[in-house]
Amino acid sequence: MSSIVEPAETEAARHRPGGTGSTGLPEAPTGQDRSVRHALLGAALEVFTERGYACAGLAEISAHAGIPVGSPFQHYGGKRGLYFALWEEFREEQERRTAAAVAAERSRGVDDPVAVFMAGARAYLEGAWNNRPLVRLFADDDGPAGFDAVRRQWDRAWVRRNARLLKVDEQQRAGRVRVTVLTTVIGGAARELGDCVDETEAREIVDEVCGILTHLSTPPG
């Protein structure tokens, strides 16, 4: 799973009908549709988590949501669309959280790249703990066709954004590798937090990882 920090258009959003993709996500809902879509996403997360994406059925998802069986197709284009919508929801929430932390740090007059980066990193990790069911879902190798490619694309994009945030010259291999390592550490820590069930332990993990990141973020010399 990829890392922080600066907001960008979500991959799933680019796949909406009328856009340039194939996940089949509809336009933003209004009124009663919003409630139906919220119920569908909650039910999909529950069923995907319990049974895995491959074994999950739309009838079961609809039953969990308490709505007609055709609703997943109407609102999301099917099971794949539901999965990508959950991914989009998670990514957007994480982006909002980390962008707010970065903005708050800068508004306090902090201009040290490492300090700003660490504010975003901590916010991302805390968000992973708060959204651990989604973290567990996306950590499994059981997503729909095309999801791995989308996730790899996000990973590459986040490495580039983290490099800009840390003011690392992407043309230099050493700097590029350092940012890649930082992003990988955050992603691995997020997966650990997804499996964590104790809040005290989760806070200890966040503190420990942030200490590691601070050390790794400091340029050599």
Image (tube, rainbow, N blue to C red):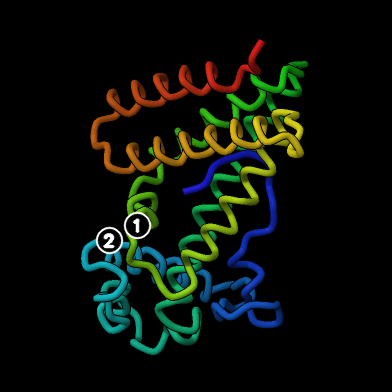
- Vertical placement of residue 177 versus 219, above or below: below
Identify the residue at horizontal 54%, vertical 18% (top origin).
214
Q: Are circles 2 and 1 on residues that touch, CB within 8 Å?
A: yes
Identify the residue at horizontal 54%, vertical 21% (top origin).
216
Q: Which mark is residue 24?
A: none
Residue 214 relative to residue 219: left or right: left
Q: Amino acid at mark 1?
A: Leu
Q: Which mark is residue 49?
A: 2
Identify the residue at horizontal 70%, vertical 28% (top origin).
166
Residue 69 relative to residue 156: left or right: left
Identify the residue at horizontal 63%, vertical 39% (top origin).
5
Crowding at dot 1, Cα within 10 Å, few <14 / some 14-19 / many 20+, comes out as many
SS for tag 1?
A: helix
Q: At which x and y percent is residue 158?
A: 62, 46
Residue 129 relative to residue 32: left or right: left
Which residue is at the far bottom?
70
Crowding at dot 2, Cα within 10 Å, few <14 / some 14-19 / many 20+, comes out as some
Q: Quadrant of residue 36?
A: bottom left
Q: At which x and y percent is residue 178?
A: 59, 31
Residue 199 relative to residue 134: left or right: left
Counting residues from the N terminus, which is met first, the one under dot 2 or under dot 1? Answer: 2
- Vertical placement of residue 212 versus 14, above or below: above
Which residue is at the far top?
221
Q: Quadrant of residue 71?
A: bottom left
SS for tag 2?
A: helix
Q: Amino acid at mark 2?
A: Thr
List the residue tagged with mark 1.
Answer: 137
- 128 or 37, which is in the foreground? 128
In whole angstroms, how far apart are the C-alphas of marks 2 and 1?
6 Å
Count of residue discs: 2
